[in-house]
Image (cartoon, coloured by chain):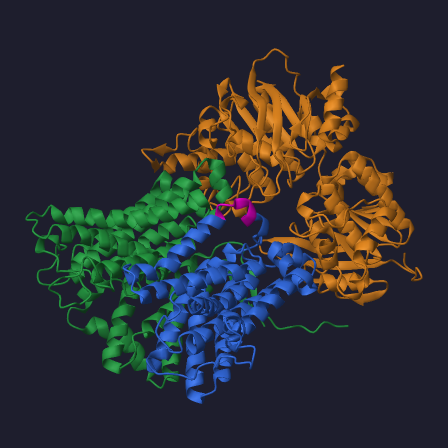
Amino acid sequence: MTELAVAFLVSTVAAATPLLLAATGELVVEKVGVLNLGVEGMMLAGAIAGFATANETGVTTLGVLAALLAGTALALLFALVSLTLQANQTATGLALTIFGRGFSALLGAGYVGIPAPTLPKLHIPFLTDIPVLGPVVFGHDILVYLSFAILGVVAWCIRSTHLGLILRAVGDSHDAAHALGYAVVPIRYGAVAFGGALAGLAGAYMSLAYTPLWAQDMTAGRGWVAVALVTFAAWRPLWLLIGAWFFGALMYLSLYVQALGVAVPSALLSALPYIGTVVVLVLISRDRRLIRLHRPAMLGRPFQARA
Amino acid sequence: MLKIEARGYESKFWRYAAPILALVLTGATSGLIFAAMGRPPGLTVYTFLVTPLLQQDGFQALAVKAAPLIMMGVGLSLAYRANVWNIGTDGQFTLGAICGGGIALAFPDAPSRALFPAIVAGGFIGGMINGGLVAWLRIRFNANEILTSLMFAYICQYLLVYLVTGPWRDPEGFGFPQTALFSDTALAPRLIEDSNVHIGVLLAPLIAIAVWVMLEKSLLGFQFRVLGQATRAARFAGFSENRLVWVAMLISGGLAGLAGVLEATGTLGQLTTTLSPGYGFTAIIVAFLGRLNPIGVIPAGLLLALTYLGGDAAQINLGLPNAVTGIFQGILLFYLLGCDILLLNRIRWVLNKPKAA
Amino acid sequence: MNESTPSGPLLTMTGMTKQYPGCLANDHVSLTVERNQIHALLGENGAGKSTLVKMIYGVVKPDAGEIVWEGQQVSIPTPGAAQRLGIGMVFQHFSLFEALTVTENIALGLATAKERVGLRGRILQISTEYGLPLDPDRVVHDLSVGERQRIEIVRCLLQNPKLLIMDEPTSVLTPSEVQKLFVTLRRLASEGCSILYISHKLEEVRALCSAATIMRLGRNVARCAPAGKTVKQLAEIMINMDLRLPTPRPLVSGNAPARLVLDRLTIRSHNQFGTSLKDISLSIAGGEILGIAGIAGNGQSELIDGLSGEIPAGKPESVLIDGVAAGHMGPAERRRIRGCFVPEERNGHGAVTTMSLADNAFLSGYLRGALVRFGVIDKKRTLAFADDIIKRFDVRTTGPRAEARSLSGGNLQKFLVGREVLQDPGVLVINQPTWGVDAGAALAIHEAIMALAQGGAAVMIISQDLDEIFVLADRIAVIAGGRVSEPVATRSATVESIGRLMGGTSEDMVADSAVAHA
């Protein structure tokens, strides 16, 4: 029974990590008033860039770096079209997802079914060997801890620093921010790039740690779940953790129940996380007051400086 | 440096020229990508865009491929005009195919032609159920339709996999994940003997024209146009936003369902686990390339259908992975959206004058 | 507040030019502000005042022109550069962040971390010192317009400015708040901070300012000492024509039947930070014009939304139009029983700016104009209707196919008022009839409203402009905090008595109306 619980907790944290990384990035993007629906595309680009680089060089760190850069590059493409050229953000985000899927499929055509070096799991003597607590708390790979650290820093930055205040201000009223002399578009570029970098990392986690293989469309909608998580958390960083763990648990459960051989068809179990997303979205969105209180007022609105 | 300057009005010229510019840029960019991959860019673009049409029955294949894209694109052009972001037409397509296909499988021995209209209706209603669910969740619970419609696409796909590998699997199909073949009375009527050209090829442009007339000439269409451009003005005029969200989701969902059932009964003749080769996202590009105008959607649908055939041709003739289609489509949508800045702005080359101190 | 030795003017601008697409906003404009001076920048809406000051503050880049600040030629590319020179600005549409606190808002206006040290204490200190009471920890969306303006002033004062620009500061204040603001401004000027005061309110300018620069259609037309001119003289320089008031109407006889009756109308605002309406009861007779005065954000937009049906009331009987219970009806049904409405915001509410005038005429006129047959739009009749509005209301445009956004604010407002007036309304409600409209258009709109009432319609005008209300209305009521006071006859009302109600809490209003009844 303890073993089961340990496996459950360890797997939940693992399944939650890509969601947490991508959602943290998207939260920062939405805080400055930009809606980037291309998370799925940026994750896929990160996954293949990381996998291919790690495979060619044999160095996982380089793979992680490449994923980060790929995510950032795609995010900048989004920023160029939606912020500089002022195209509709929803449509541009969709374009990014379509492009990212095609790009990763093309680049990954030669990598299907090949193993790559995997991110090593941490092993701290004594600590990791503590029963139950050890593997659950101290037995993950570095990206898992990084995801917590990033979330903590983002939460602190948004709440308590002047930079965070500027980010919130730009998301609350870009016209007022502009009138006070803040460079709205460059600030948004920065946030979008940050979101892309984290989505790239999330992709790297998928292809180098979670299921260390490349498969076409391997993120299977996780990018979209990450976008939904931001709404679920009502733009409050620490709530992302709860949401990510919930979905992590749901994803693990759907695999686990299948392994147990329970007489529920596997295809229906696989749909569970998506049904969960709809249910959770409905539950949180019906509280219109909560959404209105926390939703950045400029979310998705185009900005054009009159000068 | 380049400077973006507002015109203050919408340029008539760029309304039509922008999509063409986007196409040219897409062709050039794809050529560059092919060159970077070590392929002859000219030949590859040629293989991608021209070769499919030179093959025997090339135009027939194009029309068959374009029909579902046009139907879905027409629905989306309506929905997007009203700022209803249905991006899960794949799910509506699939549920339509499931519902229509279910009727076909339930009556394998139906003798009369009356079966086919029932199947088509089933498909349309299946798509409407999916779309209606999305509308209901948005109106009743304020749930974002972008996310819910896409989640339903995944859910419907798994439902299809479940049915095709489970209760509906063909017992004589050697364990393949597919249903039994539909009976002849359940198949979509052909327009040309011994070809794939089914009735959907005729229906798609008719639907486009009908929706265009509705949008341009009717009060309902006017309501859609106002809602898309100014929500408050729509409320001032007394147009119900909720009603329009319902209509947009039911029509775009229903048309996707129709496309799905026609794909199942017209080209496949059975249900398999892979009904839609990513039509859902492609239809989004079709709608934008057609400038959210149902008539414009017709050539746009033909062009995007060509990219599917081109992907296959590039795979067979040049050994390129057919994921090239996805890249091409993504780049095209980027350029389409980016070029729209020329509608309301002009781009000028401005030299930075150093200011005298 | 400043130690620099005064010599020569503080600010001199010459040849300032700014071209917007289709509009030359500033054409070689000059301006000189002396030290310790309260200098008025006068002009109608659209005269180019805001563009000029935005160039001073670095928000808008001039196409040409020279700025000399304390004897030095400078360029001001950003608001930050303006602040470093010692220029502060209080905007007309406040540049505040609704979701942030007062302290956070002010912190965002300060460039360096050093300036932000001990900010909360300094805000309290300045706000008490200058009579600008503020709670640093409150979130802006809970604050009144007057409080919001104080935030901006305090934000400027923290930077020890040498020049404070105020863009139409009194349009959002009650008369008594205006007096308090003037005290603060005079004190600032005496301490060495010059003030550039932008306004089109002439009485104020005469009372406050020692010099005035007057603009018209993007050009300088005069520079004078306002105290030496009469209001009428100033107005005629500003609008370049004889100031004409609408011809007064004969008073309405008190016994005409009521056409619009509100009975304890209570409405929850749809807006996140809006004001809900509480128990509004009043009635307007045929032929009568009722003016609703009040400061922005006290429930005006909710009131017109509640009357037009955009926000239906729960009880049908809370709104009666010609005796028909209409509280539950939507806008289309209310139009059917001859209720017509003009909202405050033209762009995107009263009109769809990207659509043609014909489409905009159709927008609210399709029912009463019978412009739809069997669900199909009658193009010909729609064009004829739009053309009729354009001709009868002298709308300057190329024709009914022109896009609404190609019209100036005044012309579009004439079109929108004309659209409703020509639908033969029994009840007409207009929110801010002449907001942002030039004098010629304002006069035309006022005359149309009076003619409509003359013809027997019940008219309600909701306005922040007390002058407008006193010119048009037979009776005046005040909206404050979502409640409406008992209407009083215009001839027995004074600016002071109405102004007291505008600033009053609901308790005051109850007390006041109790006194009125006693």
In the picture, one chain is green; tell me its letter: B
Q: State the image quarter where residue C265 is shown.
A: top right
Where's residue B49, x and y in %? 28, 73
Q: In the rendered structure, does residue A288 fall within the stretch colored magenta?
A: yes
Where's residue C447, x and y in %? 62, 28
Q: Chain A is drawn in which colour?
A: blue
Q: In the rendered structure, does residue C43 fall within the stretch colored magenta?
A: no
Q: State the image quarter where residue C69 is shown.
A: bottom right
Span colored in magenta: A285-291
Q: Colour of chain C?
A: orange
In the depicted view, which residue is nearer to us: A198 or A41?
A198
Q: In this view, does B149 lie to the left or right of A161?
A: left
Q: Can residue A281 be seen in this view?
A: yes
In the depicted view, which residue is nearer to us: C238 or A148?
A148
Q: Is residue C93 visible?
A: no
In the depicted view, which residue is nearer to us: C461 or B252?
B252
B314 lies above or below B289: below
